[in-house]
Image (cartoon, rainbow, N blue to C red):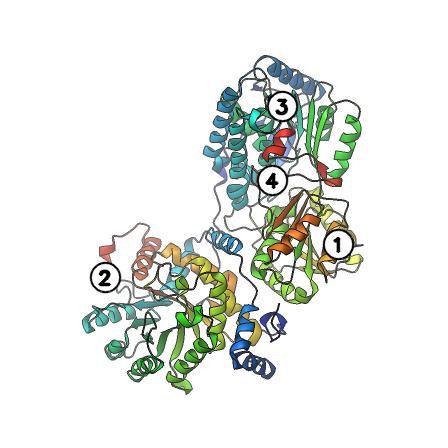
Amino acid sequence: MTTTVPSPRQQDTGRNGSGGAPPVETAAALAEVTGTESGLRRFLHGLPGVDQVGLERRSALLATRSIKAASKLHALDLAVSMIDLTTLEGADTPGKVRSLCAQARRPDPEHPDVPPVAAVCIYPDLVPVAVAALHGSSVAVAAVATAFPSGRSSREVKLADTALAVEAGAGEIDMVIDRGAFLTGRYGQVHEEIVAVRQACGSGPQRAHLKVILETGELGGYDAVRRASWLALLAGADVIKTSTGKISPAATLPVVQVMLQAVRDWHRLTGELRGVKAAGGIRTAKDAIRHLVAVNEIAGPDWLHPALFRFGASSLLGDLLRQRRTQLEGHYVGADYIGSA
Amino acid sequence: MDTWTYAPAPESAALARLQPSYRPFVDGGFVDGGGEPLKTVNPATGEVLAEVGTADESDVDRAVAAARLAFETTWGPMPGAERAKYLFRIARIVAERARELAVLETLDNGKPIRESRDVDVPTASAHLFHHAGWADKLQYAGLGPDPRPLGVVGAVIPWNFPLLMAAWKIAPALACGNTIVLKPAETTPLTALVLAEIAAEAGLPAEVLNVLPGAGDVGSALVGHDGLDKVAFTGSTEVGKQIQGRLAGTGRRLTLELGGKAANIVYDDAPLDQAVEGVIEGIFFNQGHVCCAGSRLLVQESIADEFDELLRRRIETLRVGDPLDKNTDVGAINSAAQLDRIVELAAAGDAEGARRWTSPCPLPERGLFFPPTVFSGVEQTMRVAREEIFGPVLSVLTFRTPDEAVAKANNTPYGLSAGIWTDKGAKALWTAQRMRAGVVWTNTFNRFDPTAPFGGYRESGFGREGGLAGLAAYADG
């Protein structure tokens, strides 16, 4: 370890608190890390490396887990409850969003025991429509912001974008990091921007939850994913999220694995529980269950909760519902036998 | 929601097509042996799987004579391109019957189906394919212009990788034009006998391959037989030394693949999460019944506490149980004798002052099981650091400098394998050059490929299996 600032590997890791503020000495040490550009750089580049071969091998191993019977049914319901049902198209309309919201509240009306999804994820201008449509339900309204998906605009525009969504009632903000700044090593700028967006999310119990999209497909490697994850966590991200869904590759099992390790290590360091959102590219129940296995075995069972793990997806829900019916009824049903938003 | 547990996902035992009895394979057919039949047991349940006829000395004579005849009349004179056809056919049938072989191996040995399915059987098939390809190209293998087979090979293999070890012996021996008499381990004879059945199905000329089940007495009669030209043994160092003593002065060739006490060196700049995986793969793969197991973890002191925490946390997620369950990570200990040895050595660790930590994982109520165990505070002088435990027991030592790591890693009479974990290429090479071990893995562990020579030196034996060096053990240039 080359860094002289406190790092995850130098901290007392004996505590296992859940939630709550980090202990005073940890908080002070973290403030020291984030205080300067060079401090941040030393910290991020002092994190343990990621070996690509070993990482992908572990992912392949996790994918061999055989989830059957009751554990499969449980996993399917859990996955449904973790979905951020998403539409992020230029052609989105209030009608499209209302239709999505209806399915979010009751994913499979013929089976009322299917839990509602976690959130509906949309562009900021459509937030009022979703807020009205989801009123009285447990489903949150998440809005992408900060010049999504590229993040290429001024700080003022990004903050205004965030404020627009928050004022319209969005309970969750999915922001993108400035990949240009990250890739040129301006970590302080990325950090500062996340902090500013977090402030724009409000304060107190009404503060919108902040998910920080790393766009891992543009970062160029697993070491960079680990650094970006820590950068976002240091800046106060509630959830670190893989992708916008506009870039391929998006959420892959190895990338999600690195991010799960980051929140696991953050918890070891600070006692705080932060979340992960795997977004983009997860279309089948099988793939979703593989991610849940990774959550269970890498971060731990504490993270098997919609507050700490999400799927950002549009077509995944349909396959989960089909597989669920298959488990219950013993045969596959055609996609057209289930309503789809 | 309630906690999420994985429901049992057992592979069907019926896939093994288990027969009530098995017999020695001699002269191209299954015959009644002269030895007392033995019962082979499923170590996960204690149930008898099948009765297996064993060989006696006269069967050894007969098998060696048969192999000699085949060497002189059919297999020895056969062009390499023709031999290759048989080997390719055997390799293909092994791949086609992979599921059956995997389940049978798991039943007989106790290893998890995930490993027999994803490692043992595919690697055995790959080894056969690889050597089939060499059969007609031996003059280009760097062994000289016209490599000649040695003659009749006597091979004795252990119980930890029954099918894979059989393939490791049979494939190069046959590819080079030798014939072979193979003795599988007493507790795990079944897959070698199915391999013989596969050879017959492939039309391999009778007498080229002979399989003689039995205990140590059969192995002893075989390796000491005058009719052999070469002996290949994989097993314990103790038995290997006896064989070497008996063969001294006979002019017969010998290769030995014996025990080990490999070090896994984790530097402070290692990719930690992957190093944790590699250490686990190194010691808990196949319940630690691996001669090249990374049974000594050498971790740099500056990261020792954090590594220890990450390691234990990961070990807790290992699932110990029914080997046929597809989600089982660590299966059953192969025999009561082996379990006793593990228990005894672990007790020695306690007595000598090492700190024992045992994974809190639940264990099955019946069958032979031992939970993943880590000894920390181990010193070089302790038995758990010096003796091969051959079980799921890891000894953790620390070091401060690369020189100390190298010195500790080499401070063992064994020399089979070593692992190095660092993100710095130059440091990995520096360390690898100083490891007195036949196989050195960098940022990975327990990877087996037919193109890579495997073997040890000092008390881990001599000779190589796989790669060009492996061919050299079965041919004269």
Which of the marked residues, 4 or 1, is nearer the chain's N terminus? 4
Mark 2 is surrounded, within 10 Å at the Cα level, by few (under 14), some (14 to 19) or many (20 or more) other residues, namely: few
Mark 3 is surrounded, within 10 Å at the Cα level, by few (under 14), some (14 to 19) or many (20 or more) other residues, namely: many
Q: CA distance from mark 3 to mark 4?
A: 24 Å
Q: What is the chain identity of the residue bearing mark 4?
A: B
What is the three-letter code of the residue carrying label 4?
Asn
Foreground mark, 3 or 1, reads 1
Relative vertical location of residue A103 with respect to residue B53 in this rendering, above or below: below
Nearer-the-camera pick, B410 or B380: B410
Asked if badge 2 and badge 1 are on a common chain, one would say no
Relative vertical location of residue A190 with respect to residue B268 in this rendering, above or below: below
Which residue is found at the position 50% from the left and 20% from the top? B82
Q: CA distance from mark 3 to mark 1?
A: 40 Å
**Corner quadrant of residue A93:** bottom left
Label 3 sits on residue: B180
What is the three-letter code of the residue carrying label 2?
Gly
Q: Are marks 2 and 1 in contact (CB under 8 Å)?
A: no
Relative vertical location of residue A84 with respect to residue A323 in this rendering, above or below: below
Q: Quadrant of the C terminus of chain A?
A: bottom left
Q: Quadrant of the N terminus of chain A?
A: bottom right
Secondary structure, mark 4, is helix
Q: CA distance from mark 2 to mark 1?
A: 65 Å
Mark 1 is surrounded, within 10 Å at the Cα level, by few (under 14), some (14 to 19) or many (20 or more) other residues, namely: some
- Residue A17 visible to the viewer: no
Q: CA distance from mark 2 to mark 4?
A: 50 Å
Label 4 sits on residue: B109
Q: Are marks 3 and 4 in contact (CB under 8 Å)?
A: no
Label 2 sits on residue: A339
Which residue is found at the position 50% from the left and 76% from the top? A234
Q: What is the chain identity of the residue bearing mark 1?
A: B
**Count of marks placed on residues:** 4
